[in-house]
Amino acid sequence: MSATKYQIFQWVAVMGPNNRVQPACYIKPNNDFLQFSTANQYELGCIISGTNTNYDNNMIIRGYVNNSSKMPNCRPNFAEVTGYYIITLDIDWLEYPMYNNLGFIEFYGINSHK
């Protein structure tokens, strides 16, 4: 697994602009990820794998990075205890992956070549 590939711990459906339902996933970041996402203004190219769903299409999807405590209806204790960050994907919601196939997400820079 490369340094830019992270295990997905949870999937959720979130309401985006214009009442669009979008997928979002939770990861546990490291310092390299936090620096990389900052350098890219919290917008990254994402490739999903290992979910056995239509998300696994090897296509780069724009993703938006947020600390899980900054999301609507957040649970501050959950965010503090887990340290998870949430990545909202700029695609339409398709489905929940099975609990034993939550998959992985790999990140690429959109705004920076770091």
Image (cartoon, helix red, strand yellow):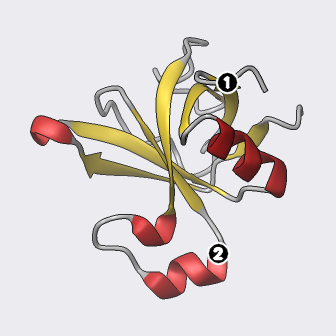
Q: Check disc 2 and report the residue beneath it.
A: 82
Looking at the image, the residue that sits furthest to the left is 18
Residue 36 in the image, given as x and y percentages of width and height: 73, 40
Could you say whether the residue bearing mark 2 is in a helix, strand or loop? helix
Left or right relative to 44: residue 73? left
For the point 60% across and 45% down, which residue is it?
102
Q: Quadrant of the C terminus?
A: top right
Q: Residues within 10 Å of mark 2 (few under 14, many from 20)?
A: few
Q: Check disc 1 and report the residue beneath it.
A: 112
Q: Are marks 2 and 1 in contact (CB under 8 Å)?
A: no
Q: N-terminal of the two: label 2 or label 1?
A: 2
> Which residue is more in the foreground, 22 or 50?
22
Residue 77 in the image, given as x and y percentages of width and height: 51, 87
Q: Residues within 10 Å of mark 1 (few under 14, many from 20)?
A: some
For the point 61% across and 34% down, which residue is it?
40
Type of the residue with mark 1: Ser
Residue 48 in the image, given as x and y percentages of width and height: 60, 28
Q: Quadrant of the N terminus?
A: top right
Residue 72 in the image, given as x and y percentages of width and height: 29, 66
Q: How many marks?
A: 2
For residue 37, which numbered disc appears in the image? none
For the point 58% across and 59% down, which residue is it?
85
Looking at the image, the residue that sits furthest to the bottom is 77
Label 2 to label 1: alpha-carbon separation: 28 Å
Q: Nearer the viewer, mark 2 or mark 1?
A: 1
Type of the residue with mark 2: Thr
Res 51 → quadrant? top right
Could you say whether the residue bearing mark 1 is in a helix, strand or loop? loop
Res 108 → quadrant? top right
Left or right relative to 79: residue 91? left
For the point 49% across and 21% down, which residue is it?
61
Left or right relative to 1: residue 105? left
